[in-house]
Structure formats: structure tokens, C-alpha cells
Image (cartoon, rainbow, N blue to C red):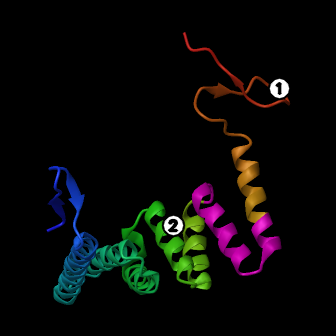
Amino acid sequence: MLFMKGERGDIRRGAGSRRGFIILILLVAACATSVFAADVDTLRKAIEKSGDDTERALLYKDLGDLYVSGEDYSSAADAYQKALSLSGYAFTPGEKTTMAVYLSWAGRLKEAENVLNLVLSENPAYTEARVQLARVLSWSGRNDEAIKELNLVLSETRHTPGPGYSWRGSCHGPEETMRQ
């Protein structure tokens, strides 16, 4: 029992309330762990049964996402590598960039760099991938290359103001426009 009535009828914490709370937390964690393990097992079985590379790639990505939700970036990186090797064209540039982020978080900087370069070869103006590439290059100790990538981002974004802004030919940048 977590709470007990005191002499005056008020509710007071019982001696076992802390122990009960800890047991409750452990039970919730155990249930979450078993659900996680069941989900991993279900995805692995689906991957084994699938004969289509694109479907298997999508399932491996789902498996990687599941590992990320459990903060197991190394296992997520393994799953993402398999997904990308099976069918890199099954994923959007945003999905590939996100997978590259988690590859880099797992310490697989070269693999992350390769994925980001692939994304940028398909879409050189994809700012999110270029910024992440700059991070990866910086983490690899290649600061000159990282600065080069960031300068490309700055040169691209300098000429594309956000919504509600337009260039008026001024060297001072965008000015807000009035919408009538």
C-alpha cells in the first residue's frame, strides 16, 4: 500500500511507499523491455521471410528506428547500413540524412559521410545534409573541409530569404513585404 490514513484522517506516506514506487518503476521497465524485445524479434522474422530487397530495406530501417528509440545507436547503425545497402533508392533524402545522423552518433563517421555525399550527389542544394556533412567532417578532424561545406550552405541560404521576405535589390538583405 502506497498511502495510509493517519490518526487525523489525513493521508500520509506509508513506510513502504518508496519501496512500492521502486517496484512499480521496475515493473514498467520490465514490460517496456519485453515489448521492445518482442518488436525487435517481430521485425527480424519479417526480414527473414521477405524476399524483396526493397521491403527488407524498409524493414531494416524500421528496425534501426526501433533501436534508436531505445538509444542503441550501434545496433541502429547496423540496421541502417543493411537498409541502405539493400536499396538506397527506397528512402527520401530526409530519411537518408536522418540515418546518417545516427550512423555518426554510433561513431561511424566514414559511413555517415558516404551516405551524406550520396544524398548531396542526388540533391546538391539539400541544406540539412550539407550541414550534417560539415558536422561529420568536423568530428573527423577535417575542419577545413567542414568550413568549406558550411560556406556553401551560407552562400545558398544568403540568396533564399524565408517566407514573407523578398529582395529589393538592396545590398542590405531582405526586407519584409506587406501582403495586401
Quadrant of the frame with the C terminus? top right
Q: Nearer the viewer, mark 1 or mark 2?
A: 2
According to the picture, the residue beneath numbered tag 1 turns out to be: 170
- Residue at 38% over, 83% down: 79
**What's drawn in magenta, residue-wise?**
124-147
- Residue at 57% over, 60% down: 123
Quadrant of the frame with the N terminus? bottom left
Query: What is the three-letter code of the residue carrying label 2?
Result: Thr
Tag of residue 97? 2
Give the farthest residue toward the top. Answer: 180
The answer to if 146 sits in the magenta stretch is yes
Q: Main secondary structure of the magenta part?
A: helix
Q: Position of residue 163 (x, y in %)?
A: 58, 31
The answer to which of 8 and 55 lies nearer the viewer is 8
Tell me if residue 157 comes above or below residue 47 in the rendering.
above
Q: Position of residue 151 (x, y in %)?
A: 78, 57
The answer to if 99 sits in the magenta stretch is no
